[in-house]
Amino acid sequence: MSDKPATTAQKTKLRVIACGMIAREVMAVNEQLGFDHVDLKCLPADFHHHPEKIAPAMETAILKARDDGYEHVFAGYADCGTGGELDKVCEKHGVARIEGPHCFSFYMGNQTFAKSDDAYMTTFFITDFLARHFETFLKRPLGLDKHPELLEIYFSNYTKALYLAQTDDPELDEKARKAAEFLGLEYERQFTGYGDLIPALAEIA
């Protein structure tokens, strides 16, 4: 038996159906792992604001992947606020997903996050995506640009903004810092890299 790694032609094509918030990260991990047999399709990032849309959209996307001839499909989501509905869809269609309650957990490392107990109950998390798109993804959709008085309603329970950085980018660091300042929260940065996203994609791919 040959110990040589499978060539691209021998590798089974895999479709990853991911949250648009982690599209850049999935592509970066694929490049880091040398994968060229992964086809990435993304659901809208703003489902983050409407988690009830995730499970139905995932089922539609899985069925489309099967119609496209993809036997192997992976859900690039944690539970992400679906309350177990995403797991029901994944189980129904024999599709695995990233472990964890949300992307903040798997970026930090699910085991690390699980051991934190309630330490992050008053923490607002920022990722590379949110730092990059704070204005268009959070500030404007929540109406904070025109009605800053809503800050007290939305963020009164938070005390700290924790930037979980996937990359070492001074520009994003500054954007995250300004986002925290706008929200009136203490700023902290923690470099996580891609966390559990790497082993999740490495295993399934």
Image (tube, grey):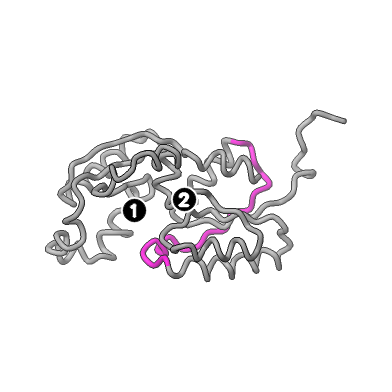
> Residue 66 versus residue 167: which sits nearer the camera?
66
Q: In what quadrant of the picture does the C terminus appear? A: top right
Residue 76 rendering spot, x and y as whole percentages: 53, 53
Residue 129 rendering spot, x and y as whole percentages: 38, 49
Q: Is residue 138 above or below residue 169?
A: below
Badge 2 density bin: few <14, some 14–19, many ≥20, Cα 10 Å: many
- In the rendered structure, the answer to whether residue 202 lies left or right of residue 23 reads right
Amino acid at dot 2: Ile
Residue occupied by mark 2: 22
Residue at 52% of width from left, 71% of height from top?
56
- In the rendered structure, the answer to whether residue 31 lies left or right of residue 185 reads right
Q: Quadrant of residue 171?
A: top left
Q: Is residue 176 above or below residue 42?
A: above
Residue 143 rendering spot, x and y as whole percentages: 22, 66
What segment carries the magenta color?
33-51
Answer with mark 2 or mark 1, whichever residue precedes in sequence. Answer: 2
Q: Is residue 86 above or below residue 185?
A: below
Residue 68 rendering spot, x and y as whole percentages: 70, 64
Residue occupied by mark 1: 133
Residue at 29% of width from left, 38% of height from top?
173
Residue at 28% of width from left, 56% of height from top?
135
Label 2, label 1: how many angstroms apart (C-alpha)?
A: 12 Å
Q: Name the outermost residue toward the left.
A: 149
Q: Look at the numbered disc 1 and give the secondary structure of its residue.
A: loop
Q: Look at the numbered disc 2 and give the secondary structure of its residue.
A: helix
Let me know if residue 108 is in the magenta part.
Answer: no
Amino acid at dot 1: His
Let me know if residue 42 is in the magenta part.
Answer: yes
> Residue 24 versus residue 199: which sits nearer the camera?
199
